[in-house]
Amino acid sequence: MQSKGPDKELNIKKITERLVSMGLTQSKLASELGVSRQIISNWLKKEKFPRPEKLLRLAKLLKLSFDETVVRIAAEEEPIIAFRKKGGHKILKDYIESAKYMGSLLEKLVPFLPFDQFSRPPSLIDPNHGYEYIHQVTKEIRKEICATGTSEILFQSLISFFIQHHGVIIPVFWGNRDQHENALHIYLPKSMTTWIYLNLDSRIHDFKFWMAHELGHVKSPDLKGDEAEDFADAFAGALLIGKETAENEYIQMRRLRTIPKQINRLKELAENLVVSPLTVYYEINMYARYINEPEIDLETNKAIYKATAVFNRQFHTVSEYLFENQKPTAAEYMSCSKKVFQSPFFDALISFLKGSKKSAGFVQSLLNLPLADAQYMYEELC
């Protein structure tokens, strides 16, 4: 039986043509790639599929692009990937393919999760990002997690809600990144499980928004692409800043008049709710548009964006809060994942590794870590 990627196979015709044009034999190719002649034969017979690092070396050696090296296979149950959209930032195809490969590895952990394997987690029937609809939905969720009125949504309330919806939080250390790498969402249709990679190196106020954003994806698993991202963004804003809060703050902002006073009001509310001032600002203006009233304009000289940048720098990253500015050991990191984020990820990974012959490379691919860090983690896991 062919061992291949979850949704692709080698483009044998293109690869063979390139081998001929370059005068490469299978033996020579094997030597260049550091594999046996039999491995090459298995690849070309579609009996085996190269590991990611060998696939990349194969494409580079033959001077082929990813699309020329592999052929996509339609798959109804392939992993569904979502990155939080940020402005006009383009998400590279290779990044999506890498995330899908991570999803194929996560499938191996599903049997070890403590979830009901026979029923689908509750989701929305017809999700859309209309203002009234979004706030009706999030109002019910706020009630469910005991955050009525203008009260703050607590981190632990969000975390518990993920567990109820078969969501597995995977806290990771991916550095201080400004784009979609701060959160990665992988939904596996076959098992109806959701895996959420959350970057612990994110600022804490942004982190809460990303958690709420990912919960929006969990509640709308059938949405894809930009439609899914737009819904998740609208859901996150409405969940963290309810309609009642937006209405009250819009009235207050109109009374304050001057930009410095308005920004100070935003920062005060943002600190109380542990969200970004920009999130509060956007939600107030969404309310203004909803009631057909003038929006609050804090964008002269980019005032709101500068104020938000200064505001965020006052606070630590999530990892700094959790580990008191110290780099955690592998044991401390895994303990935090379980205790703070209620994540079954590492327990499932340990159970899987016990019954398999996977190496540290599996952990490296699963967590997108440097090999040295993956080896350190692997030793702790095993």
Image: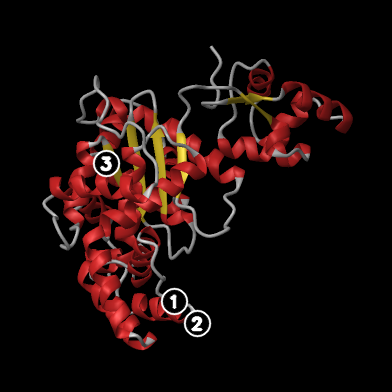
On the question of residue 286 being in view, the answer is: yes
In terms of secondary structure, where does tag 1 sit? loop
Is label 1 in contact with label 2 (beta carbons under 8 Å)?
A: yes
Q: Earlier in the sequence, mark 1 or mark 3?
A: 1
Q: Position of residue 125 (x, y in %)?
A: 32, 31
On the question of residue 342 being in view, the answer is: no
Q: Amino acid at mark 2?
A: Thr
Is label 1 in contact with label 3 (beta carbons under 8 Å)?
A: no
Residue pictured at 51% horizontal, 41% vertical: 225
In terms of secondary structure, where does tag 2 sit? helix
Q: Is residue 240 left or right of residue 309?
A: left
Looking at the image, which is closer to me, 93 or 333? Answer: 93
Q: Position of residue 27 (x, y in %)?
A: 75, 26
For the C terminus, the image quarter is: top left
Question: Which circle marks residue 346 in the picture?
Answer: 3
Question: Mark 2 = which residue?
Answer: 300
Question: Mark 1 = which residue?
Answer: 297
Above or below residue 125? Residue 259 is below
Q: Position of residue 208 (x, y in %)?
A: 29, 59
Q: Amino acid at mark 3?
A: Phe
Above or below residue 79? Residue 339 is below
